[in-house]
């Protein structure tokens, strides 16, 4: 068996990558989430932040301020009374920003096909990831976060984000 020895300059390893990949790796591993829990899905979102699922290992920290957050998590039934505030919080978030819609009620209005319930958060703000279920398990929420991390890593850091279209 041949033995190969790599000689590093000054004894230190060399890392080769592009600036885009480095920036996107940093962004994807330090997602600060604005927790916007509106109904029973919020309980599952809180459980996901607990010790068993430990979102800290993904670099996800739940924040209460939109100005410190990059990911908005809509968990639960969005009423039309709250829609204006949801849009205002989304507009206050710095770019780049992403949205996760969690639960059937946030995705499509759920079983509440009434005059007071928004029939899908995507009518108010653009959504990147939909998590189905009533109420979705923390594992599915964790999987959605990992999909969002992959999506962020594929984007270019240097270009502006394209404007997301609403329905």
Image: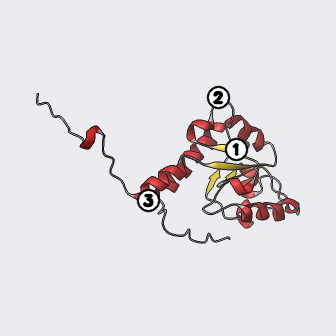
Residue 145 relative to residue 155: left or right: right
How busy is the neighbourhood of tag 2: few (under 14 within 10 Å), some, or many (20 plus)?
few
Q: CA distance from mark 2 to mark 3?
A: 33 Å
Q: Residue at x 47, y 63 (%)?
A: 156
Secondary element at tag 2: loop
Q: Quick check: 57 above or below 102?
A: above
Q: Residue at x 73, y 42 (%)?
A: 135
| Colouring scheme, one of rainbow, by chain, secondary structure, one colour | secondary structure
Secondary element at tag 1: strand
Location of residue 12 by image quarter: top left
How far across and how far down the image is residue 150, in percent? 49, 51
Q: Nearer the viewer, residue 147 or 113?
A: 147
Furthest residue toward left: 2
Disc 3 marks which residue?
Answer: 20
Q: Quick check: 162 above or below 120?
A: below
How far across and how far down the image is residue 89, in percent? 77, 60
Secondary element at tag 3: helix
Disc with the residue nearer the chain's start (3 vs 1): 3
Q: CA distance from mark 3 to mark 1?
A: 26 Å
Q: Residue at x 67, y 38 (%)?
A: 137
Q: Nearer the viewer, residue 155 or 127?
A: 155
How busy is the neighbourhood of tag 1: few (under 14 within 10 Å), some, or many (20 plus)?
many
Disc 1 marks which residue?
Answer: 62
Disc 2 marks which residue?
Answer: 52
Q: Are marks 2 and 3 in contact (CB under 8 Å)?
A: no
How far across and how far down the image is residue 105, in percent? 76, 52
Q: CA distance from mark 2 to mark 1?
A: 16 Å
How far across and how far down the image is residue 86, in percent? 79, 60
Location of residue 117 by image quarter: bottom right
Give me the disc on residue 34: none
């Amino acid at each position: 068996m041949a033995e190969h020895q790599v000689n590093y300059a000054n004894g230190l390893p060399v890392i080769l990558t592009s600036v885009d990949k480095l920036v996107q790796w940093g962004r994807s591993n330090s997602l600060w989430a604005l927790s916007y829990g509106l109904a029973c899905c919020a309980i599952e979102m809180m459980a996901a932040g607990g010790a068993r699922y430990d979102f800290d290992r993904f670099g996800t920290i739940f924040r209460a301020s939109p100005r410190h957050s990059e990911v908005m998590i809509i968990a639960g039934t969005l009423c039309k009374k709250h829609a204006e505030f949801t849009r205002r919080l989304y507009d206050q978030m710095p770019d780049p920003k992403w949205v996760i819609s969690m639960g059937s009620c946030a995705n499509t209005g759920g079983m509440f096909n009434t005059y007071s319930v928004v029939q899908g958060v995507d009518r108010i703000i653009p959504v990147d990831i939909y998590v189905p279920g009533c109420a979705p398990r923390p594992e599915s929420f964790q999987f959605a976060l990992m999909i969002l991390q992959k999506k962020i890593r594929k984007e270019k850091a240097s270009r502006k984000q394209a404007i997301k279209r609403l329905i």
